[in-house]
Structures are given as structure tokens and as C-alpha cells.
Image: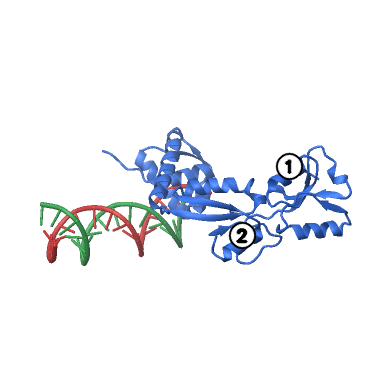
Chain colours: A blue, B green, C red
Amino acid sequence: MTRDIDIALLRAFLAVVETGGVTTAARILNRTQAAVSLQIKRLEELFGTELFVREKKRFILSPAGERLFGNAQRLVALNDETWNAMTTPQFEGEVLLGVPPDIVTNLVPPVLQRFNQAWPRINVSLICKASTLLLEELAERKLDLILTTEIDSGSGGETLLRDRLVWVGGPGCDTHLQRPLPVSLGSKLCRFRPEVVKALQKARIDWRPVSQDCNMEPLYATVRAGLAVAPLMRPCCPAFREI
DNA sequence: CCAGGACAGTTTGGTGAACT
DNA sequence: AGTTCACCAAACTGTCCTGG
């Protein structure tokens, strides 16, 4: 006689193993403690053996429970994988995604990788421009979706990451001690530029611009070479030295 | 003959309460 | 904190009927 193993029972079994008790497992599973207790009982009746050793208020896996554990994990995972494969809509098409140059190198690749795994039939066209231009093109419906860097959270968007700007310089360089201070500011359209200039004026630091290209590579090159310092978002400057 | 809908009886699995 | 029990709702199953 063949019997089918109820995935819900295995899920309850795994939750009890992970939490070490029925009450916490029930909270995770959105069931009452009694329901989970009954599920474990049904599973034990199905296999005709005890899966746990009840020690005071702790549930410890019995040898049979140990045998079941690995297979239960695989069965639940396969169930979930199959469920997702059969119920997730298979969207097709193209998404025009706009991203500013300062975050495209370090922050965007893992996002694109996860997106591509989740929606393999959607082609992403990446457009790299200053945040100001991206906002204009989104308003004109030339882009489907944009990521922007902002001083403050604007309306109509969602804040995905909040971080502070830091001054960075090349490893071993004393560029930050020079006056006037050589500063690579990037594009004149950069949203951070007015705030950075204001901060320099407030600190009464005499400065001069170095790289003002909208492309980040010249900026990185001048910083790495010790020709300038630059204000960057921390996640975007792992190879440099924070001053 | 088969597919599909309606219906009734049965089974399953959840909850709350009482108890250990 | 866990188990057991009574109760209840939902899901399942089998049967009958109808239409293509």
C-alpha cells in the first residue's frame, strides 16, 4: 500500500525541530498550539513511530525523526519550488531601467541578477544618466522604472537605501590636505553637488574642481591617482579610503 | 460512452476548553 | 507547555442525472 505524505505535516515537523517546541512552531505556522500538536501526532501515526523524544518541555529528535529530517527539508523545498514554478506568471517583454552613474557599478548588478533569475523572459535595458535627467524621462514615459540618488526622499518614489556621503581619497594619498582642495564632483547635474559645495563653503575650505564628467570612471581615476578627493556614497567606494 | 454539475454523506483538520 | 476531547466548517468522495 502506498501512502502520500502530507506536506503540511512535514512543515509542522520542521517548524517544531527548528523552534524546539510546539507553541513557537504554531506561532510561525499561524496555527494554534493544539493544531500543531495534532499534526505531529498524525505524522507519527502515519510512520508508526515516535519522531520526538519529549524531555520536559523540549522536543528532541528521535532516531526516526533524525532520519526524516533531511528528506522532510527536501520535500518541503521541492514542494515550494514546484508551487512557485506553476503559479508564478511568466511575464515577457522589456523594461527600460534608468540608473544614475554613481550607483550603477556597485549597487545595481546584484539587483539585476536577482531580477533576471526571477523573471528570465524579461529583457532589461539599462540607461545610465544623471538622476535629474532620469526623472525628466520618466515623466515623459521614455523610461519604465528609475533608481535615483537624492538628498531627501522625494514624493512619488520609494526609499530603498539611506546612507551618508563620505569624502574619499586614494590609498596612501594626502590629497585632502592640499589647498585649494582638489575635488572631483562628477556631473554638474549631480543631485549631491549643491550640497557638497554648500558644505565646503560652510567649512571655509578653498577648493577647485577636477573631474566634472558625468561618467564616474574619470572621477574614480582622479581619486585613485591622488589628484583629487571626492564625495561618494559609502556603498559605492569600497576600494578607496574614507577620510 | 464520457464529461460535468448537483447533491448528500463522510472525512479531515481546525479551534477552544479542560485537564495533565 | 503539551495533550485530549467535543464541536464545527471545509474539503473530499461517491452517486445520480443530464447533455453532447
**In this rendering, is residue A170 above or below A91?**
above
Query: To which chain does the residue with label 2 belong?
Result: A
Q: Quadrant of residue A65?
A: top left
Q: Which residue is mark 1?
A: A221
Tell me if residue A206 can be seen: yes
On residue A41, the disc is none
**Spot occupied by residue A217 in the image (x, y as percentages of width and height):** 69, 45
Q: Which residue is mark 2?
A: A134
**In this rendering, is residue A215 above or below B9?**
above
Please tell me which residue is depicted at 65% across the width and 58% down the height of the picture. Answer: A131
**Spot occupied by residue A89 in the image (x, y as percentages of width and height):** 41, 54
Q: Nearer the viewer, residue A122 or A5?
A: A122
Badge 2 vs badge 1, beta-carbon distance below 8 Å:
no
Query: To which chain does the residue with label 1 belong?
Result: A
Tell me if residue A57 can be seen: no
Q: Residues within 10 Å of mark 1 (few under 14, many from 20)?
A: some
**Spot occupied by residue A134 in the image (x, y as percentages of width and height):** 61, 59
Label 2 residue SS: helix
Horizontal side of residue A213 vs A108, given as left or right? right
Please tell me which residue is depicted at 41% across the width and 52% down the height of the picture. Answer: A90
Instruction: Tell me how far mark 2 sits from mark 1, CA to CA.
Output: 25 Å
Label 1 residue SS: helix
Label total for image: 2
**In this rendering, is residue B3 above or below A57?**
below
Amino acid carrying label 2: it is Leu
